[in-house]
Image (cartoon, rainbow, N blue to C red):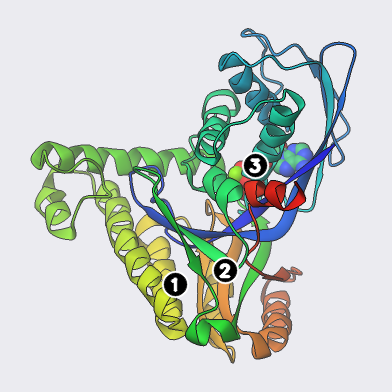
Amino acid sequence: MQYTAPGRVNLLGEHTDYTGGLVLPMAIPFATTASISAADAGYRFTSTAFENTRDTYAGDDTPKANDWSDYPVGVLRELLALGLEVPPFSLNLDGDVPLGAGLSSSASIEVATTVALLHHSKASLSAQEMALLCQRAENRYVGSPCGIMDQFVVTAAIEGHALLLNTRDLSFEHLPMNSGALAECSVVVANSMVKHSIANGDYGTRRNELEVGQAAICQAYPQVRDLGDASMEQLEACRSAIPAESYLRCKHVITENARVREAAESMKRGDAAALGDAMNRSHASQRDDFQDSVAEIDFLAATAVTLYGCYGSRLTGGGFGGCTVNLVLTTAAESFQRDLASAYRKRYQIDAEIYRCTPSDGAVARLERNA
Ligand code: ADP
Ligand code: MG
């Protein structure tokens, strides 16, 4: 049996998903397929993208392999921790979500594995439980301190819509992406093909800096539960008590939450220009305040907005490389792709991969469609 889960691109709301903030991602047509068959004994994982096979019984003492297989094994461990009886299987993962490019191949492989293992075990979980389980797998076993956005949208997205998610209480709204001027627009993802090696450590550092600022605000204002509640006035009042880096990271998150609110309203009105403007301001905030951009990405974003038909462009995903997301008039998408690629090649001698992405179904909607 085969089960699929998509990748995702985040339109707005970066680094807001682990401090109770808002995010606005959508699922993309790239996907991971998990093919599962019953086996005589044990649990076997393979991936078309990698050579090694992982055989495990996934006990409590299962050491990490420190490779791709930790993602699906982490999922299996979380399912077993729920008390689920999982019969022996062989599971192969195959997909076209670019790995490590900020389009969340990790959540895609986790959610595809979860759906496959649940069906194999004749069990079910709600979309929210699945997303939380995948996040736990990534946090606890893989060891990456990610928020909930990726797993949630990869599970719960529906075609034609972006997903406005409140990461504090996991309430969400599907926002149609075809109202007003947005009906004439496409989401174009530009993969810079660079990933700076500082990425992993720096994600954790940024997160710590943010949490220091958040703790100071929560202490000064007991009614503030997390940065999702905080205002710029409150941050300013705490400025002298926190390191300069913490101030900048918190400033990004507080202003980013406001931009997501604004962008969601723009989307409902079908106001492509206003949505694009919020994306551009988000990029500037990541570049200057959160400081998780790199020269190649800044070049792609700055060039994109000079091209005909582009309303907005920003770094998307974990940062330090990866992709930009662009809102572009559909009639101009082809020339946009060509001209952006050519400018990038000229400047960096790198061939960017540029894809037009329609908002796609998450894993649950895919299952329902195939049922
Ligand atoms: P991103 O989620 O942005 O793609 P991550 O570093 O979070 O980047 O996750 C990428 C990792 O997920 C890959 O290096 C690999 O270990 C794992 N992965 C994703 N898709 C697959 C797949 N189809 N097969 C095996 N491993 C995969
Ligand atoms: Mg990831």
Q: Is residue 190 left or right of residue 252?
A: right
Q: Is residue 1 left or right of residue 103?
A: right
Q: Residue 343's x, y, as percent?
A: 68, 81
Q: CA distance from mark 3 to mark 1?
A: 24 Å
- The answer to whether residue 120 is visible is yes
Residue underneath mark 3: 106
Of mark 3 and mark 1, the one earlier in the sequence is 3
Q: Residue 236's x, y, as percent?
A: 13, 56
Residue 335 or residue 302, whichever sits in front: 335
Residue underneath mark 2: 325
Residue underneath mark 1: 279
Q: Amino acid type of disc 1?
A: Met
Residue 261 or residue 283, whichever sits in front: 261
Instruction: Name the image quarter holding residue 218.
Output: top left
Helix, strand or loop for disc 2: strand
Q: Residue 332's x, y, as percent?
A: 66, 89
Q: Amino acid type of disc 3?
A: Ser
Q: CA distance from mark 1 to mark 2?
A: 9 Å
Q: Residue 368's x, y, as percent?
A: 68, 48
